[in-house]
Structure formats: structure tokens, C-alpha cells
Image (cartoon, coloured by chain):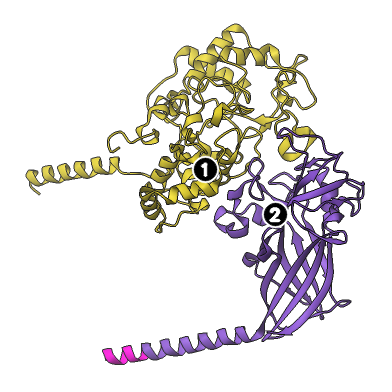
Amino acid sequence: MKIYILRNAFIVLVSISIALSSIAQEIEAQFAHFTLSLNHIVGERPLILENETYVNFSGEKFSVSTFNYFISNIILVRDNDEEYIVPQDDSYFLIKEDNPLSKEIELLIPEGRYKTVKFMVGVDSLRSIADLSRRTGALDIAGGMLEGMYWTWNSGYIFVKLEGNCDQVAVDRTGQKKFRYHIGGFGGYKTPSLNNIKTVAIDLPRRGRIKAKNGKKTTVALQVDLLKIFDGNTLISLKENPAIMFGNTSKAVAENYSKMFDHLSTENRRR
Amino acid sequence: MKIKHIGAISLLLLFVMSFTALEFSGFVVPQNFPPPVYDMAKSPVTKQSFELGRKLFYDPLLSRDHSISCGSCHIQSSGFTQHGHDLSHGVDDRLGNRNSPPIMNLAWNNFFMWDGGIFHLDLFPVSPITNPVEMDEKIENVLIKLRDKQEYRDQFKSAYGSDEITSTKVFKALSHFMVMCVSSDSKYDSIMRNTGTRFSPAEEQGYEIFKAKCNSCHTEPLFTDGSFRNNGLDTTFNLDNGRQAATLHSMDRFKFKVPSLRNLSYTVPYMHDGRFISIDQVLNHYASGVNYSNTVDPLLSRESKPGIPLTDDEKQQLKAFLKTLDDKHFVTRADLSEQWGNDS
């Protein structure tokens, strides 16, 4: 009797594990590798930190020391308008110019043809108020505002951080001619406040749809033009605004940077 | 049952009871308090997490040069504020721009800091630790320093089941110490809990004045309603926009979080910038010093002259009542102090 039960349990266990592994294989079979590649430029030239000098639309010469931003909540739209939403917990990416690996977002997506890539620049309001245990990795608040992308005094993420030097800017307390743009604002906790969450949609057909297929890897390359931060819709002068942080001026900057992403190319390749 | 047995059983019971009395009881909501805001179910305070939090709270390792701990600016005997300092002092004697608020009854707070910029207790410690005028340290370095110590690796393991030390665990342990800093053993509390204690006549009169003139903002039993208000302080002396910096709303200009009135005897000086050094100054401000501005609290501008009318007698009675909110037990409790009474 005892042996009989044990044998039955064994058979059940084995069949469950076979079923599970076949489901896993099936899921694996339906997915394809996808990379969103971000290429930072300033006008016509590639972004090089510290040593390169650029000129903005106000004729101000500047160099860049830090360029970081969040991309989150990635959605791919199929040709038939169905959406594939990247699982939320795996959809937060901190892009840093000084970390080349961070500029390649690697995902697994279901097979199919996609015509649009959508993402958020910044961090959505729900995650901005979520329990700390759900904010690890890119969302770790430990860096604070100096090293990291988080306002410690006013709970919330800095969505885009751009810092550098500009001769036209007045000397600051540290004796430098620095400009500091820390743009964020998820809409406020309990009472509505600054909301700089921007959603960007990249239409792919002109330069190539995603044709995701198992065994293949699709790379969508985006060009990110930092110069647009100073002139997307509103002209921003460094001399007049050496520091833009949590305040109403940041709205114009956020509107500007929502226009800095352009589709360069799509490659559907065998892995 | 023989008498001998009953005697033995009651002795045993007594022994068990005295043992449990010494045991860690976790977070307990005082009988006369509302339910807490901090989600205890999601993050239950254990003896281990509380003790880890306490160790971290008093460890100067959290500051850049190992010179100050959280406890340096939040001193238990001063009701967990920085005694004798109007503005907070950090490393290298750097000066903050506001007065250290008390670590007290934080489990009932929705917002932290005078301007309420921080909306969860777990999000709080990163601020003083990384602030250049406070502890001026990187969390990354704090984690390296902690991981380097076997005692911390052991304590993290006993609190969280793994000796991996992360920022989230550090912040949550600090929260667990802070939520346990409950002040609910004042004379007022024992009266409210019907223990037989009574107000003196002056205290009783003060309580009546309090209920008529103060309770709408300093609401019982926490003695704050947790809101942000402009109490009409002179802003020429120290221009601080308060809550407006966090919300960007012009109607929030000069508004600060309503502080609790508990433990005032230990927490001098008063106001967000520590400008008043006595309760008399505070009462005189409300009686005759309130400045009108467009965001001054409506409750302070009901009369033709802004403020709260108070006679000298009423001030004395109020002071007598406010004294009943002092909680000697809270400022001397061994389990909240820098070291355990006997096991350190």
C-alpha cells in the first residue's frame, strides 16, 4: 500500500516536471532577442564627456560631465495594434553616458512584427511611491542626488540629469562655472504637483519594423540628441538657467527632451 | 487539587509572566492612540530588526568621518532632538537650516521633515546620511563599512535571514528602531487611560483652554493633525518658504508641519528654525505676535487682529497642562538608549 502511494506520487511528480519543462521550452521558443540601442550625440557630433566642447542654440559653448536618464515602461506595438507590455518589474533602465553597457537595453520579446516602440522617460508615479523592497537595481535610492538619481529631500527620482561646464555661466559656490539640470517630478504624492513624466513613441516602419523571430536578434538603434534639451520647443540658455531642478522651469526642459529621440535603424539578424 | 499544587502552579505562572515581561513585545499601539500609518503587517518589527536598527541609529560609522550618528542630533534625553541648537549641526560643524525634529510617534506620520518632502519613513535615512551639512556620507560607503564588520553581518543575518547587507535592509532596520520610539506614558496619557491619575485644577483649566483654542491643529492624542500650516512667524528674520519648495504651490508658502506638543520640556528650542527658546515666547507669539500674510492659517485670522487671544492667566494654565504631556519614561527608556542597560 505504502509503496503504491509512493510510486503514484513519483509518477505525478515526474509528469508535472515534464509538463513544466515543455511549457518552459514552448515559452522560450516563442521569444526573440531584442535590443534597444541608445546613441548619444550633440548636434552633429558624438557625445564625449568632459573634453569635448559644443555650442547650443544660444551660442553658448559648453562641455558635458554627466548625462543620465531613466527609460521605463517599454511597450511594443504590433502591426495589428496589439501591445506587448514588457513585464513591469523588468522595465526600468538607468542610462548613463559613462557606462556603455547601460546604453544597450536587452529584452526578450514575443515573436512578431512590431511597428512602434513606446517608453517613458522617467519613473511612473506608482513605482515612485512603491515600497522600498520593490525599488532595487536601477531604482535603488541609495545614490541620493549627488551620486544617484534621487531627490532625498523631496522623495522622487531625478528622471534626467545633465551636468557640465559653460564659460558663460557665473562662478558658483564651488568656484566652478557649472550648469546642473536635474529634471524630475512624478506628479506629487497625495496632492498634485509637478509632473514631468514623458512618454515617447518611435514609429519604426520608415527605417525598419521589428521582425522578431526565435533565433534572431533585432536591434533598434535610437539617436539621442542632447542638444534638443536646449531647444526642442523652448530655447533654454545656460547663462540664464545654470541650475534647473525641482521647479516650474523644468517643464520646458522636459518638453524639450521628450523630442530628443530619433529612430536611426533596425537590424533583424540571425544570432 | 491540593493547595501545594496551586502554590507551585502560581509560582510557575509568576515565573513565566516575569519572563515574558522582559521579552520583546514588538510594536504595540497604545490604548488611547489611533492605528498607525506605518504598515506593520507588511514589515513587522522583530526583536532582531529593532536591535539592528538601534545599533545603526547610534553608530557614527554612518557619517563620513565617523564623527556623528543619528543619535547625535536626535538625543533621547532631549526627546530625540538636538538640545541647545536652534539649527542642526552636522560634520565639520556645518550648519543645517532647520531645527532637528523629534524621533517620536513617527509610526503615525504621513510626511517627514518640516516641509513634508519625504512621504515614507523608509525613505528618510538616505537624506541625513548623504546631506553634506549633516552626515555627508555615501550609502555605498556605509554598506562597505557595515559589510566589513562581523557583528553587523551576524545581526543582519539574524534580522533578515541572510548576511547580505543592502541599502533597503539598512533603511528598514532604522525605521524599525524609529517606529518603536513611541511616547505615550505622560501624565495626560495615564489620565486618558483612566488609571486613577487626575489633573490638578490648573492643569484641568489648561486642558479646557487647549481644547478650545489649540486642539484643531495640535489634535489629541498625538497633538498634531499632521497638516502643514503657516502660523504667522516673522519671515524677515529667516526666509524659508517651507512646504512650497516640495509642492511648488504658492498657497503652501511659509507652511510647515504642525509639530506635536508632547515632551516640550525636553525639546527646546521651538519652531522650524528654533527661534523660540521658551514656551512663554511661543504663547506670546500666538497671543500677540502673529504676522498676517496671504497663507497665514485661517484659524489664526478669525479675529480682527491675527492670533489666538490669551490672557496671562490662561497662558499659565496652558503651560501647566502642556507639562502633563512630558513623558519621562520615553526620554529615559533603556531599550531606546545608546546601549542596553546590562548586556553591553
Report the residue at 84% width, 70% height from top. A263
Who's purple, chain-wise? A
Q: Main secondary structure of the magenta part?
A: helix
**Residue A125: numbered disc:** 2
The tally of labels here is: 2
For label 2, count other residues whose C-alpha is less than 10 Å away and answer few (under 14), some (14-19) or many (20+). some
Which chain is home to disc 2? A
Decide if residue B61 is on the left or right side of residue B231: left
Report the residue at 44% width, 14% height from top. B200
Secondary structure state at the residue bearing disc 1: loop
Where is residue B213, by image quadrant? top right
Position of residue A230 measured from the top left corner of the image (x, y, whole percent) = 87, 50
Quadrant assignment for the C terminus of chain B: top left
Mark 2 or 1: in front is 2
Amino acid, disc 2? Ser
Residue topped by disc 1: B36
Front residue (pair A107, A25): A107
Report if residue A221 lies within the magenta region.
no
Position of residue B272 measured from the top left corner of the image (x, y, whole percent) = 63, 26
The tint of chain B in the picture is yellow
| B210 relative to A134, above or below | above
Secondary structure state at the residue bearing disc 2: helix
Please say whether residue A113 is visible from this viewpoint: no
Q: Give the residues drawn in magenta, as a range.
A: A1-8
